[in-house]
Image (cartoon, rainbow, N blue to C red):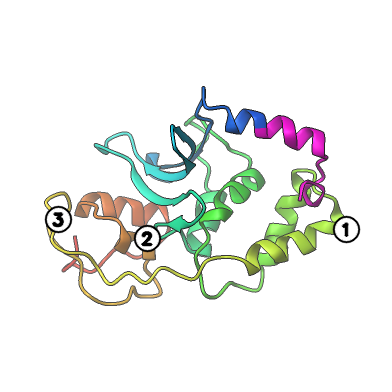
Amino acid sequence: MPEWFGDDGADTDALSEVLLDDRAWPAFRVPFQGGHSTVVVHRKLIGDFGIDYLLTRPNWPRAEALSSYDGDWYGPGLSWRDIACIAGTPDPTAPGVHDTAARLLLLLPLLADDELPPEAPARVNAALTAIGAPEDSARNTADHILRNRRPAARCHGGADSPLSGGSHRHTEPDPKESAVLWALNLTRSRSDALAGALGSGPLPASAS
């Protein structure tokens, strides 16, 4: 509902025309530590409209898919800890969105977590009011967004991959690890670099 965010119907209609125009693919880049970026892409393939959330780094041969939405969600998403870390560590040397409130809100659709820290509602509330949402509705909007998050991804590791150079252990991630590291088939060096950027422990030595 536009009014939850301090918007009106006319502004929402104008924005929808831009986002749904099949002549352009709007994209929002959220750069963070180590040269990594999360990119939100509004996909406009004929008969295949949706939103893709990608993870990129200049020296990677391709972008890694975090999640996609085309009526249903696909992909592992991110934990609250990962989203908070990315939102709070902008890379000012890279192009993209640097405002921490806008970064948090752009990443929130990726949220897939079973438990949230007590400060999560207040942080989303503050981000909403920072971008102009009415204070009298921001709390309810924040609660609605967080209440409708997806469950945490259950990643038990993948099969051997020629891209990853090995296989993951078949186990649950340790609480100090980022679950998304288990979901992406990255080489060891790329996985370690991403773990460092997320403030997470690296995957065990037996994983790639």
Residue 82, percent from left and from top: 48, 59
Q: Position of residue 46 (x, y in %)?
A: 43, 32
Question: Which of the two discs, 3 and 2, labels the residue nearer the N terminus?
Answer: 3
The residue at which mark 3 appears reads as 161
14 or 41, nearer to the observer: 14
Looking at numbered disc 2 in the image, what kind of residue is underneath it?
A: Val
53 shown above or below 199: above
Residue positioned 26% across, 49% down in the render: 190
Answer left or right for 45 relative to 194.
right
| Front-lying residue, 176 or 138 | 138
Dots 3 and 1: beta carbons under 8 Å? no
Q: Badge 3, how many Cα within 10 Å: few under 14, some, many 20+? A: some
Tag 2 or tag 1, which sits nearer the N-term? Answer: 1
Q: Amino acid at mark 1?
A: Asp
Q: Which mark is residue 202?
A: none
| Mark 3, secondary structure of its residue | loop
Residue flagged by tag 3: what amino acid is it?
Ser
Find residue 180 and name its label. 2
Q: Position of residue 164 (x, y in %)?
A: 17, 53
At x 62%, y 66%, the residue is 148
Q: Is residue 31 magenta?
A: no
Judged from the image, the secondary structure of the residue bearing numbered disc 2 is helix
Separation of residues labelled 1 and 2 (CA atoms):
35 Å
Residue, x 48% and y 31% (percent of image)?
93
Q: Which residue is mark 1?
A: 136
**Quadrant showing the C terminus:** bottom left
- Whichever of callouts 3 and 1 sits on the residue coming sooner in the sequence is 1
The overriding secondary structure of the stretch rendered in magenta is helix
Residue range corresponding to the magenta coloring = 1-16
Task: State the CA–CA distance, disc 3 to disc 2.
Answer: 17 Å
Q: Give the number of callouts.
A: 3
